[in-house]
């Protein structure tokens, strides 16, 4: 009896470039699973030459360090989630038109970074103006916003809003404050219109943002931030709807986050460090 012909694996004839072209069209989770197919697939997907073409997800953290014994004193870093190997993304941001040392990272959200920098030498008194740049370090795509209305020396809280499941456009939100650091309004930049709009605050006269490092959540089209007034305040990106959500006193220990499409508030009891409220 004649044996049936041996079945040929069609994938064997595919070149690496063809495989990468197929994989780049798949969701991130599927690509991660395919690393387990074989050692050759793991090597293919992990190859730095192919990584930029494949779907990207959160793979690490940006941070900076200060050291008076080096120049520059402040240095930017990127650490992989695993803590091992060379960084997947280099923090020099060499793909942008300004040096990385002249840029401050203000916020990040869903894979995008909002960065601030002074555009060049400034003539006259006072602080120079500044620009915002929003970029995706994984794809090296970036966009510049029009000039910010504040001087670079002014204190400001700036937040980035981006939900890729809803829209490819992003928003930059500036919280405008008076001499007492109370919020008087917000300036909102939309990448869709490429313009800023100012809206006077409808939260009241005593709202103070926790600080410029306060956590924020962009959820359902609203930017949420924590305040010193035992409340979370939120505004939509058209400045039409303003909300105040009461929370327990948190001082400097509270933070907000989102999980499974819900807004979460976390607080550590100052009298009992082992007591966490959610």
Image (cartoon, helix red, strand yellow):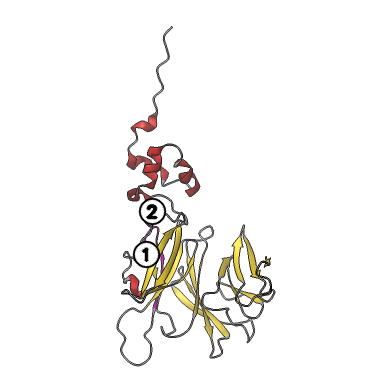
When the figure is inspected, residue 111 is found, relative to residue 34, above or below; the finding is below
Measure the C-alpha gap from mark 1 to mark 2: 15 Å
Q: Which circle marks residue 57 in the picture?
A: none
Residue linked to disc 2: 85
Residue linked to disc 1: 91
Question: Badge 2 local density, few (<14 within 10 Å), some, or many (20+)?
Answer: few
Camera-nearest residue between 172 and 249: 249
- Percent position (x, y) of residue 24? 41, 47
Residue at image position (31%, 80%) is 120
Residue at image position (40%, 28%) is 9
Element under disc 1: loop
Camera-nearest residue between 190 and 86: 86
Residue at image position (64%, 68%) is 265
Looking at the rendering, the stretch of residues picked out in magenta corresponds to: 131-141
Question: Badge 1 local density, few (<14 within 10 Å), some, or many (20+)?
Answer: some
Residue 147 magenta-highlighted: no
């Amino acid at each position: 009896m004649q044996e049936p012909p041996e079945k040929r694996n069609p994938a064997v004839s595919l070149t690496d470039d063809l495989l990468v072209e197929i994989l780049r069209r798949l969701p991130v989770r599927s690509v991660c699973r395919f690393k387990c197919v074989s050692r050759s697939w793991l090597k293919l997907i992990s190859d730095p030459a192919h990584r930029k073409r494949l779907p990207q997800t959160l793979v690490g953290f940006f941070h900076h360090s200060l050291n008076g014994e080096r120049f520059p004193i402040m240095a930017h870093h990127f650490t992989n989630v695993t803590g091992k190997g060379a960084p997947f993304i280099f923090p020099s941001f060499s793909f942008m038109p300004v040096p990385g040392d002249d840029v401050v990272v203000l916020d990040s959200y869903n894979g995008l970074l909002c960065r601030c920098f002074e555009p060049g030498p400034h003539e006259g008194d006072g602080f120079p103006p500044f620009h915002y740049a929003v970029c995706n370090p994984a794809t090296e795509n970036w966009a510049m916003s029009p000039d910010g209305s504040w001087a670079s020396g002014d204190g400001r809280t700036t937040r980035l809003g981006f939900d890729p499941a809803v829209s490819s456009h992003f928003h930059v939100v500036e919280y405008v404050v008076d001499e007492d650091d109370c919020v008087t309004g917000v300036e909102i930049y939309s990448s869709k219109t490429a313009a800023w709009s100012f809206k006077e605050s409808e939260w009241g006269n005593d709202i103070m943002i926790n600080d410029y490092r306060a956590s924020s959540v962009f959820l359902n089209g609203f930017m949420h931030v924590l305040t010193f007034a035992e409340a979370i305040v939120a505004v939509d990106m058209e400045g039409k709807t303003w909300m105040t959500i009461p929370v327990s006193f948190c001082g400097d220990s509270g933070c907000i986050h989102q999980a499974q499409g819900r807004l979460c508030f976390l607080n550590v009891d100052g009298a009992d460090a082992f007591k966490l409220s959610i």
